[in-house]
Amino acid sequence: MIKGFIFDLDGVITDTAELHYEAWKALADEMGWDFDYQVNDKLRGISRMDSIKVILEHNNTSLEEDRLAELATKKNDIYVASLENMTPDDYLPGARELLTHLRTEGYNVALGSASKNAIKVLAQLNANIYFDVIGDGNSVSKSKPAPDIFLYGADKLKLQPEECIVFEDAESGVDAAKAGGFHSVGIGPEERLGHADLRFDSMSEATLFEIKSHFKDLF
């Protein structure tokens, strides 16, 4: 039986993708690196340090680890400053409605995000009331596609992976859910998330009714 839901943050609850893109773009321009939306799309669901390594690989260059960490921190400072403008109006359509419905129905809910700024984003959205457990980039050492962040959430909820449904917008996130033995719901295009157990183009389509209809044997 399904008892818990675990949500990624960026691209599922809210869309900070453009803010991340602008921060990486500002850093890349300063460093003279090539960076565009195509490269940015490869950064979905992975950690800050892994992201900068993807950008360096794209530019056929390398740096010492301490310099990488310094630049990743610089990017993060740009991004965090931009979060000050985020408000409770910045939920993705359908996200707050689903979270509210899950609260009403009494389900356990966890956040499973690679972001180390998840607590700040949740505060800006006034979203803490919807989550029993917060798992973020500070909670585990291995980021997606390793299943650790979802296993952390399930453990804190005192649930088994097969009792939880994971919501993800990243290929690596669905890979992580599958690796951990979770049921998965993908939010986004078929070409990126066709391997999820269930997929919607947007959160507005991902109602609890639709989820229960698909996983009817689990409710």
Image (tube, helix red, strand yellow):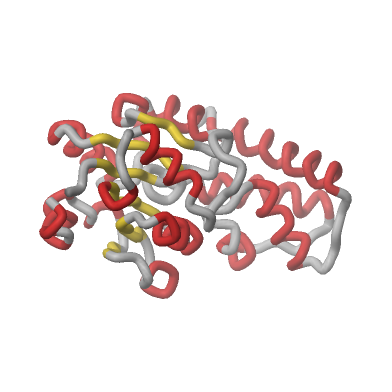
Q: Where is residue 103, by image quadrant?
A: top left
Q: Is residue 76 left or right of residue 99?
A: right
* Of residues 172 and 28, the one drawn nearer to the viewer in this rendering: 172
Asked if residue 183 is positioned above or below residue 138 in the image, the reply reads below
Q: Residue at x 13, y 35 (%)?
A: 105
Image spot of residue 8 (x, y percent): 42, 46
* Of residues 60 and 158, the one drawn nearer to the viewer in this rendering: 158
Q: Is residue 13 left or right of residue 34?
A: left
Asked if residue 33 is positioned above or below residue 109 in the image, the reply reads below
| Residue farthest along the bottom direction in this orientation | 191
Image spot of residue 164 (x, y percent): 29, 47
Q: Residue at x 83, y 57 (%)?
A: 32
| Residue farthest along the right direction in this orientation | 64
* Of residues 131 and 87, the one drawn nearer to the viewer in this rendering: 131
Q: Residue at x 72, y 48 (%)?
A: 26
Q: Residue at x 61, y 48 (%)?
A: 47
Q: Is residue 143 left or right of residue 8?
A: right
Asked if residue 107 is positioned above or below residue 7 in the image, the reply reads above
Image spot of residue 72 (x, y percent): 73, 43
Image spot of residue 53 (x, y percent): 73, 57
